[in-house]
Image (cartoon, rainbow, N blue to C red):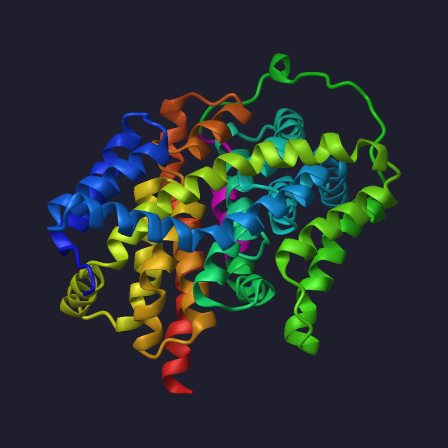
Amino acid sequence: MEIEVSALGAIIGLIISILMILKKIPPVYGLMTGALIGGLIGGTNIVDTVSLMVSGAQGIIPSVLRILAAGVLAGILIESGAAAKIAQSIVAKFGEKRALLALALATMFLTAVGVFVDVAVITVAPIALVIASNAGISRMAILLAMVGGGKAGNVMSPNPNTIAVSDAFDVPLISVMGAGVVPAIFGIITTYIIAKKIASRGTMIEEKEIEQSEEYTLPSLFTSLLGPIVAIILLALRPLFDISIDPIIALPVGGLIGIIAMGQWRKTNDYIKTGLEKMAPVAILLIGTGTLAGIIQNSRIDTVLISALEGLGLPAFSLAPVSGIFMSGATASTTAGATVASSVFASTLLEMGVAALGGAAMIHAGSTVIDHMPHGSFFHATAGSVGMQVKERLKLIPYETLVGLTIAIVSTIIYGIIPLFF
């Protein structure tokens, strides 16, 4: 007999998880506690509740393995100086006249090749501070440029959120990455327009804030790019030639080839340790999201949401972006939001006739809309990268949301509305 949790229980479990995260309790424990209480309130006994939690966590394990593998590429890009070289090269190419566009593109590119979005912002931030000081650009403008660029890069990256969504819908990772390209372009355009508008709003960067970093030799641009290029080529073999190279192989191979090309192979162990340190908290978080997803999957919450959307006059496929928005806002994490939304609603969307790639793309895009809320680490890490106070950081939320909303709307038009007519 199939175990079923009431929709009310699943919703209460989600609310409890949100409240615990807001109280700064480690998200994984908040999610697990919410799952347990939600299951019990939802009408199942403790044995069945734990069984659903374990089953949900087991479903996340393939994504966790691929995410840990992605740590090899991420660690090498960050520690070798490859990420810094890529950022510097892009900013130097555009110059100070188009500084905000350069910052957005630099952060977008770093995120797109596999660097975590918060790490990408932190990497570009020292360059951004110098430019802002020289050009008289506000702190808010440079941070929005970097955050917007990071959101755009995130929807076409081999990052944990993309891996989780591609696994849930069983579509190639490279296909989900490709599906984010056009929405990302619109995201960058929106970011640049808004950043230009607020270039003089908020506090300015003082010269004393700029730290003089130690000079060290960065790798060449070619060798910096080689690792991500190899990884993308390997991933592209499946849709192009039906040769399946799993991300668990493609991403580490790209990173290792990159570090050999940069002549830093003796430091491989140190670099991949850093990558593991970056990925381990995400992997743990995903296990927590899996326990909550196990409860929500076995509830009628999808029926409730679909009914609510229909009551608002929205088409059924809008469940994809809306669930991504809702779940990422609840967890203040693109990865957690995309993982829960895709694992819970993938089967429902497929049953409604939504194409697997379309559903994946729309959930993924929706997960960028309000993933920057104050109860998440991204909000605080990005504020710290440019020395911004919380009060000023809060003022940036509407602008960030508008960038994410642009990405989600464009993705929904391409993968939700257009297929209705063709």
Q: Is residue 123 above or below residue 73?
A: above
Q: Is residue 196 magenta?
A: yes
Q: Which of 203 and 296 is in front in this view?
A: 296
Asked if residue 329 shows in the view, the reply is yes
Q: Is residue 375 magenta?
A: no
Q: Where is residue 293 in the image (x, y as percent from the top left)?
A: 31, 52
Q: Is residue 403 left or right of residue 331?
A: right
Q: In this view, does 139 lie to the left or right of 85?
A: left
Instruction: Give the quarter of the image for residue 97.
Output: top right
Q: Which residue is drawn at 25% across and 36% down?
A: 33
State the residue lying farthest toward the top. 208
Magenta stretch, residue numbers: 187-201
Instruction: Give the quarter of the image for residue 262.
Output: top right
Quadrant holding the C terminus: bottom left
Q: Which of 128 and 289 is in front in this view?
A: 289
Q: Which residue is drawn at 63% across and 74% down?
A: 239
Q: Which residue is drawn at 58% across and 65% down?
A: 178
Q: Is residue 291 left or right of residue 378?
A: left
What number of labels is visible?
A: 0
Q: Position of residue 407 (x, y in %)?
A: 45, 58
Q: Where is residue 307 in the image (x, y as percent from the top left)?
A: 15, 67
Magenta-highlighted stretch: main secondary structure?
helix
Q: Which of 149 and 242 is in front in this view?
A: 242
